[in-house]
Image (cartoon, rainbow, N blue to C red):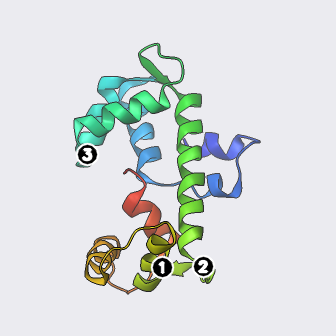
């Protein structure tokens, strides 16, 4: 997957950094099935191994499968992953108003308020803590992507 991504001329800098769990899932399933196509059951099996429910895997397959032929082709998969990567990057940049390359709980609270939500600081701290796996009180883009990339 990573080799093919880097050979693709339309890959952006966001795509160059696309090393999240989704791409690893596809690569692993390709090795298992020895195919360039994945069936819905392959996606469900792979995503369940990393703790995601069948409902998420089914929705992932539905969104990524542009041909509706019951299989997920590499091109559809890679385009879907890149579009998710772009969306995640845009979301992170929206939160990172200081352009520091990392966000803190204050940035997250501010972003939620800018979109019209009014969570309590305690609730925002809970969400932030669930994303801050290394407990450094700041979340970098790679941490952010790993934490919410499969939501």
- Residue found at the very far top of the displayed protein: 69
Report the Cα–Cα distance between label 3 and label 2.
Answer: 31 Å
In the rendered image, which residue does mark 1 sit on?
110
Depth-wise, is mark 3 or mark 2 nearer the camera? 2
On the rendered structure, is 113 left or right of 4? Answer: left
Are circles 2 and 1 on residues that touch, CB within 8 Å? yes
Where is 61 relative to 132, above or below?
above
Pick whichever of labels 2 and 1 is earlier in the sequence: 2
In the rendered image, which residue does mark 3 sit on?
52
The answer to which quarter of the image holds residue 109 is: bottom left
CA neighbours of label 1 inside 10 A, class few (<14), some (14 to 19), many (20+): some
CA neighbours of label 2 inside 10 A, class few (<14), some (14 to 19), many (20+): some
Residue 46: x and y in percent read 30, 38
Residue 28: x and y in percent read 39, 39
Where is 14 relative to 59, above or below?
below
CA neighbours of label 3 inside 10 A, class few (<14), some (14 to 19), many (20+): some
Task: Depth check: give the residue in front, 129 or 10.
Answer: 129
Where is 136 relative to 65, above or below?
below
Are circles 1 and 3 on residues that touch, CB within 8 Å? no
Residue 97, which numbered label?
Answer: 2
Depth-wise, is mark 1 or mark 3 nearer the camera? 1
Depth-wise, is mark 2 or mark 1 nearer the camera? 1
On the rendered structure, is 106 left or right of 81? Answer: left
């Amino acid at each position: 997957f990573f080799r093919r991504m880097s050979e693709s001329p339309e890959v952006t800098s966001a795509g160059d950094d696309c090393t999240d769990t989704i791409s690893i899932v596809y690569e692993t399933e390709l090795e298992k099935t020895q195919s360039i196509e994945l069936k819905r059951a392959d996606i469900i099996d792979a995503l369940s191994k990393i703790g995601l429910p069948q409902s998420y895997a089914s929705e992932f397959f539905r969104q990524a499968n542009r041909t509706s032929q019951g299989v997920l082709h590499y091109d559809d998969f890679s385009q879907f992953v890149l579009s998710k990567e772009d969306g995640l990057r845009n979301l992170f940049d929206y939160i990172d108003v200081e352009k520091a390359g990392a966000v803190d709980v204050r940035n997250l609270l501010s972003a939620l308020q800018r979109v019209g939500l009014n969570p309590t600081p305690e609730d925002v701290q809970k969400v932030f803590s669930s994303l801050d796996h290394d407990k450094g009180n700041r979340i970098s883009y790679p941490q952010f992507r790993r934490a919410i990339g499969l939501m």
